[in-house]
Image (cartoon, helix red, strand yellow):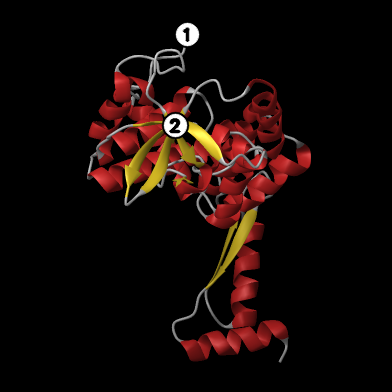
Amino acid sequence: MKRKALGKSIEAIIANRPTSYAEEKGFLEVDIDDVYPNPFQPRKKFSTEKLKDLADSLKEAGMIQPVVVYKKDEKYYLMVGERRWRAAQYLKWKKIPAIVRDLSPDDLIVGALVENIQREDLNAIEVAEGIEMLINEMGLTQEKASERLGMNRSTLTNYLRLLKLPEAVKESVISGAISQGHARPLLSLEDNTAMLNALSRILKNSLSVRQTEKMVKNITREKTTPISEVEDDPDLRKTEEKLARILSTKVKLHYSKSGKGKIEIYFHQLEEFDRIYKLLVKE
């Protein structure tokens, strides 16, 4: 299945055509120390191994395609080619070829996000953080942001929901320990503790996405399904009465055919609670 085109790539934004070494005659040789990462770059993780492979390629063939930068306060900020820039740094190059463009802040944010998503360079959390930055920096609604990115509204919303996950779960997505498909079902759990416990089970048992979805459904069902009580059981009522006499307060037993149940002990003030507590722990 063909992947749906996502917004305009940064190359389309800056030139309305692919930018290549052959097409661009007027690039500059800029000092590598004068080039800085794009502050709107959503990508946070760069594989050291892949950068070394790219460095080997640059060492062999040179930088065939210049990086694309914009200038601000006498500094150059990257728009396209951060991996090439990092690989050149690894090789201790002094200068790199660069094309300088004049871009608006909106184009900087949208272009950086779209470029990385199109190349599948971002993990799901980085995509979500990039979308959130786009919305906050440009004051967009989710609907407008989805239009700017050429992304389905529901897809955009699902990405943003991932930011509600506990940090440990997000880090697991970033590291590749679990996928977005594993993480999304966890959002239906009631709190962070439940999500972290579920994450532990996923990692310990190497659960697939489908197994994770099933696990979460079972957890949710246990939490939300009321106990189907055994009604009018004389033995149950006798036990309630006996506990009520021992504790000198109202006691209610809930018991189901599955064997699950709970005990409710009533009190009306803290002094009564203190009395019941001391009785139960025999203080």
Picture layout, residue 188 above or below residue 112: below
User: From this viewpoint, is residue 82 visible?
Assistant: no
Q: Amino acid type of disc 1?
A: Lys
Q: Residue furthest right?
A: 205
Q: Please give the residue where the numbered disc 2 appears in the rendered image.
A: 98
Q: Amino acid type of disc 2?
A: Ala
- Badge 2 local density, few (<14 within 10 Å), some, or many (20+)? many
Q: Image quarter for residue 241?
A: bottom right
Picture layout, residue 20 above or below residue 232: above
**Could you say which is closer to the camera, residue 191 or residue 148?**
148
User: From this viewpoint, is residue 92 visible?
Assistant: yes
**Could you say which is closer to the camera, residue 105 or residue 140?**
105
Q: Please give the residue where the numbered disc 1 appears in the rendered image.
A: 2
Q: Residue at x 59, y 57 (%)?
A: 193
**Could you say which is closer to the camera, residue 12 or residue 42?**
12
Q: Image quarter for residue 23?
A: top left
- The C terminus: image quadrant: bottom right
Real-space CA distance between mark 2 and mark 1, rounded to the nearest whole angstrom: 32 Å
Nearer the observer, disc 2 or disc 1? 2
- Specify whether 27 is left or right of 237: left
Q: Residue at x 27, y 34 (%)?
A: 102
Question: x, y percentage for residue 188?
Answer: 49, 42
- Specify whether 106 is left or right of 67: left
Q: Residue at x 29, y 43 (%)?
A: 135
Q: Residue at x 45, y 86 (%)?
A: 269
For the residue labelled by badge 2, is the local secondary structure a helix, a strand or a loop?
strand
**Could you say which is closer to the camera, residue 74 or residue 171?**
74
For the residue labelled by badge 1, is the local secondary structure a helix, a strand or a loop?
loop
Question: x, y percentage for residue 40?
Answer: 39, 44
Question: x, y percentage for residue 136?
Answer: 29, 48
